[in-house]
Amino acid sequence: MAIDRQNYRTYVEKKSPNSPLFRNLLCAFLIGGAICTIGQGICDLWKLAGLPDLDASAATSATLIFIGALLTGLNIYDNIARVAGAGTIVPITGFANSIVSAALEYKSEGFVLGMSAKMFTIAGPVLVFGISGSVIYGLILVLFGG
């Protein structure tokens, strides 16, 4: 049965539901903002504990990564992401979620060849880009002053 482009386009438009754009944007903004607000609260708590600003920032990043990984392992982060969409991808917790999700997906293949190896399918490119970018930036500063 042959179908022309126009009939196919009409069929797809009829079967594809419209996305509630405003609702999706609002949820992403509110939940992403809430994650960032929680991060700021954690940073303030680290400063109250006596850490200097730079150390408090590093401790906050580590804490948010831990929380994101823990919530992913408990299957809570995915439920939040269903509502928030991109609001959960942008903060640092989204990076933790992507690494832990890849590891959990392949845990049946074993600890080394499954979880440990697949964890770096997401982290690997990010690390390579981050390290390469910092080396190039460093070379630019050394060569051209900064």
Image: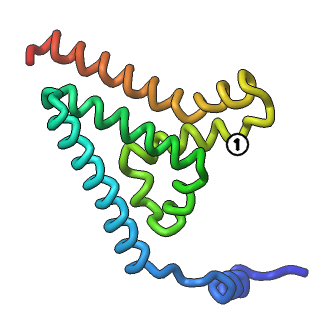
Q: Look at the image and tell me in which quarter the N terminus lies.
A: bottom right
Q: Is residue 42 above or below residue 56?
A: below
Residue 78 versus residue 98 in the image, above or below: below
Q: Residue furthest right?
A: 1
Relative vertical location of residue 50 with respect to residue 33 in this rendering, above or below: above
Residue 22, quarter of picture: bottom left
Q: Percent position (x, y) of residue 124?
A: 53, 27
Protein image colouring: rainbow
- The kind of residue tagged 1 is Glu
**Which residue lies under the disc numbered 1?**
105
Q: Is residue 81 left or right of residue 73?
A: left
| Residue reaching furthest to the left | 146
* Residue that appears at 65% across and 25% down: 116
User: Which quadrant: the C terminus?
Assistant: top left
Sort mark 1 into few (<14), some (14-19) or many (20+) by Cα contacts within 10 Å.
Answer: few
Q: Residue at x 39, y 60 (%)?
A: 87
Looking at this rendering, what residue extends furthest in the front direction? 49
Q: Position of residue 101 (x, y in %)?
A: 61, 43
At x 72%, y 87%, the residue is 7
Q: Is 50 displayed left or right of 12 in the figure?
A: left
Q: Position of residue 107 (x, y in %)?
A: 73, 35
Q: Tell me: residue 81, above or below residue 74.
A: below
Number of callouts: 1
Looking at the image, which is closer to me, 135 or 104?
A: 104
Secondary structure under tag 1 reads helix
Judging depth in this view, the residue of 121 and 60 nearest the camera is 60
The quarter of the picture where residue 136 lies is top left
Q: Residue 51's x, y, as percent?
A: 17, 28
Q: Nearer the viewer, residue 11 or 56?
A: 56
Which one is nearer the viewer's eye here, 130 or 34? 34
